[in-house]
Amino acid sequence: MSTALSLARARKRRPRCASNEPIEAKGPTMSPRIRAILALTTGLSACVIETNDAGPTAVVVHDSGSLVVDWTIDGAKSVDECDLSGSSTIDITVTSTDGSPEGEYQQACSAFATTISLAPGNYVAEAVLIDGVGRDRTTPVQIRPFQILGNDQLSIPIEFPAGSFYAP
């Protein structure tokens, strides 16, 4: 293609500002500041620029998800088991898989379930039953690694077998 022909085609594609025809902007949306600058400069050159910008782009934010820990004592959900073992509370420690502590959560032993709100991520946890003054009544129960995606609920059942309790 000759240079003269290329220039002629390029001229045909170039907007004609003096003709009062609007020029439609294409590509990424413009910020209000850029629009203001363009409005001031286009007034000087007799160009009109229209955009189809509907405003700022929405940002997707993942809400936290929930871990539900559901426990039994020696195979049962009985308040008597909490009382007989001297356990008043479950203590759950959650850690991200990279080792960062996420938190320690407690619930009454007699609830037999608790819901923990967590940000999306990968975690591990452990649980112990404790007495009224905070002493461990059981050996720790390891909660397998799990993932929270956000806006989800993951239920993990755990068991405190009779053999996991310390002597009174």
Image: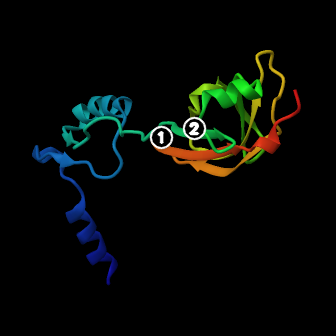
Q: What's the residue at 68%, 31% (across, down)?
A: 81
User: Label 1 neighbourhood size at 10 Å, few (<14), some (14-19), many (20+)?
Assistant: few
Q: Quadrant of the C terminus?
A: top right
Mark 1 = which residue?
62
Nearer the observer: mark 2 or 1; the answer is 2
- In which quarter of the view is residue 158 placed? top right
Q: Is 45 displayed left or right of 74 in the figure?
A: left
Q: Is 8 displayed left or right of 33 in the figure?
A: left
Q: Secondary structure at mark 2?
A: loop
Q: Is 74 displayed left or right of 34 in the figure?
A: right
Find out whether the residues at labels 2 and 1 contact each other: C-beta distance under 8 Å. yes
**Quick one: 49 or 76, which is closer to the camera?**
76
**Quick one: 73 or 36, which is closer to the camera?**
73
Q: Is residue 32 above or below residue 73?
A: above
Q: What's the residue at 31%, 33% (across, down)?
A: 35
Q: Secondary structure at mark 1?
A: loop
- In which quarter of the view is residue 1 placed? bottom left
- Percent across and percent down for residue 160 are 72, 41
Q: What's the residue at 64%, 45% (across, down)?
A: 75
Residue type pointed to by label 2 = Ala
CA gap, disc 2 and disc 1: 8 Å
- Percent across and percent down for residue 85 are 76, 29
Q: Earlier in the sequence, mark 2 or mark 1?
A: 1
Residue type pointed to by label 1 = His
Observer able to see residue 104: no
Observer able to see residue 75: yes
Mark 2 = which residue?
119
User: Which mark is drawn over residue 162?
Assistant: none
- Percent across and percent down for residue 133 are 80, 15
